[in-house]
Image (spheres, rainbow, N blue to C red):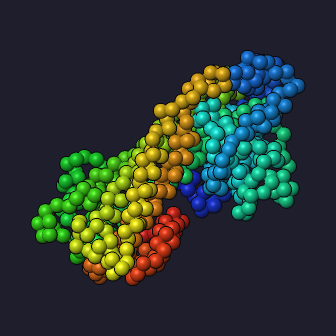
Amino acid sequence: MIILNGESLTLEEMGKILFDNVKVTSCKKAMQKVTGSRAAVENIVLEGQVIYGITTGFGKFSDVLIPVEETEILQRHLIHSHACGVGEPFSETISKAMLVLRANALLKGYSGVRPIIIERLLEYVNEGIYPVVPQQGSLGASGDLAPLSHLALTLLGEGEVFYRGDLVSTGVVLDKKGISPIELKAKEGLALINGTQAMTAVGVVAYLEAEKIAYQAESIAALTFEGLEGVIDALDEDIHLVRGYPEQVAVARRVRKLLEGSRLVTKQGEKRVQDAYSLRCVPQVHGASWQVLGYVREKLEIEINAATDNPLIFGEGEKVISGGNFHGQPIAFAMDFLKLGMAELANISERRIERLVNPQLNDLPPFLSSKPGLQSGAMIMQYCAASLVSENKTLAHPASVDSIPSSANQEDHVSMGTIGARHAHQIIGNVRRVLAIEWICAMQAVEYRGIILASPHMQKWHQEGRNVVPSITEDRIFSKDIEALTSWMKEGSSILCRA
C-alpha cells in the first residue's frame, strides 16, 4: 500500500501503482489539511466574498459575480462545458496516472475540496475504474481543462470509464459497485480540472517507459558491437573520465560489463583502427540521452507533488490567491527535451542497423540473408527503421514554442505541454520498434559469427530475444517479429545490466 500525502510521491512509487497494481490510500494528516481548507471555502461562500472560481465565473467571466445559491450549479456547468476533448482516449494506464496525480495534488490541502472527492479518486484507482479521457483538446495552461473535465465527469456518474478491459457507461459501473455519484460543491469542479495532471500523467508513463528502453538500448548496442566485431578500446574508462560526464562514464561501464568475456570484440589495429561513430560513440550519445532523462525525472518529481490549481487557499482561508500554477511550461519543456533525447537513441540505432545489413560496411551476408538475392533478409526492416526515425524528427518539433491565445485573450499564453507529452510518448513507441529491429539484426549477425564466442551476458540476452523471435532461416512476415519483440520489450521482464 502506498500512502499519498501530496508531498513525497516518487516515480518509482508511480511505477508500482501503474504497473504492479499496488493499492493507494491517503495520509490522515494530509486529510486534516484538506478538511481545514474546505472549511475556508465554505466560509467564503457563506460570507459572499468575491473569490475567483468560487463566487465568480471563469476565465474571461472572472468579473461576473455568482449568487451564493448558484455556486454548486456553477461547478456542474463548468465540468459539462469544459468536457470537449476529442480524439482517441488515453490508455487505461495514463488515465489511472491522472487519477493518482489529481488526488495527490488535492491532498496538499490548498484546493478546498471535501475529503470525499479525494477518497473517490483513490477508490477508482483501487477498483480499476479508469475514466475515458480523449487525448486532444488541451492547451496546457489554465490546466488540462478538457481532459480533466472528462475525468471529473465520471465522479458525477456521467461519461464513460474503462472497467475490466471494457469501455462502459460510468453509471452502469457505479450501480454495479454500489457507488453513489458525487454532487460537486463550491470550487470542487475548478479544483478538479485546474491542473497539469493530464500532461504530467503522460509524462510519467513516458518517462518510466523511456528509462527502461534506455537500458535495453545499451544491451542491444552491445550485441551489435559483437556482431560487427567492434573495437573495445573505445569503451576504455580513461577516455570517458577525461570528458567528465558521469552519464557517459556510466554507459561505457555498463557496456563494458555486458561485453566481459567476449571473443567477438576486437582491439584497435586487429581488424580496423577505429569504428564508425554509431559504435564508437555509444557512451557519448546514449550518455547524453541519460542526461536528458535526469532532467525530465527532476521536473516530473516536482510536478507530481505540486499544487497546480487556482485559486489556492493558505492558512485555512486567511489568504486566498489567484495565480498561475496551472501553467504547464515546465512540463512542456521537459517533454520536448525528452523527445530529443529518445529520438537520438533511435537515430543512432538505425545507423547501427545499416551497418549490420549493408554488405559494403561489413563482412556479413548481404542484408543478413541466408540466400542473398533469392531472399531479401533484413533489407526492408532497415527501411522500416528509417521511416520511424524520420517520423520522430517531425514529432520532435517542440510544442512548447507554440501558443494560441484563448478565453478572449484573458489566457493569452499557453504551454501546449500536453501535445508535447503525447508526442514524446509516440516517439518512445517508435524508438522501441527501431531498437527491436536492431536486436533482430544483431542476433542474426552474432549467430553468423558464432554465438558461443559472445560474452556470457550477451549469450543470455541473445537467448531472451530468441525466446520471442526465431532465427531467420528464410524470408517471412517480419512485421510479426518486430511487433512481438516490441511487445516483449514493453511488457516483459528483462536481464538489464545496471551496474
Identity of the residue furthest to the right in this view: 69
Residue found 36% across the figure and 54% down from its top:
347
| Coordinates of residue 174 in the picture (x, y in percent) | 83, 54
Q: Is residue 322 left or right of residue 382?
A: right
Identity of the residue furthest to the front in this view: 374
Foreground residue, 242 or 336? 336
Quadrant of the rendering where the N terminus is positioned: bottom right
Q: Is residue 54 left or right of residue 362?
A: right
Residue found 23% across the figure and 66% down from its top:
361
> Is residue 368 visible to us here?
yes
| Image height of 173 relative to 9, above or below | below
| Coordinates of residue 369 in the picture (x, y in percent) | 34, 77
| Coordinates of residue 309 in the picture (x, y in percent) | 65, 32
Residue found 44% across the figure and 50% down from its top:
392
| Image height of 386 relative to 446, above or below | above
The quarter of the picture where residue 56 lies is: top right
Quadrant of the rendering where the C terminus is positioned: bottom left
| Coordinates of residue 188 in the picture (x, y in percent) | 75, 35
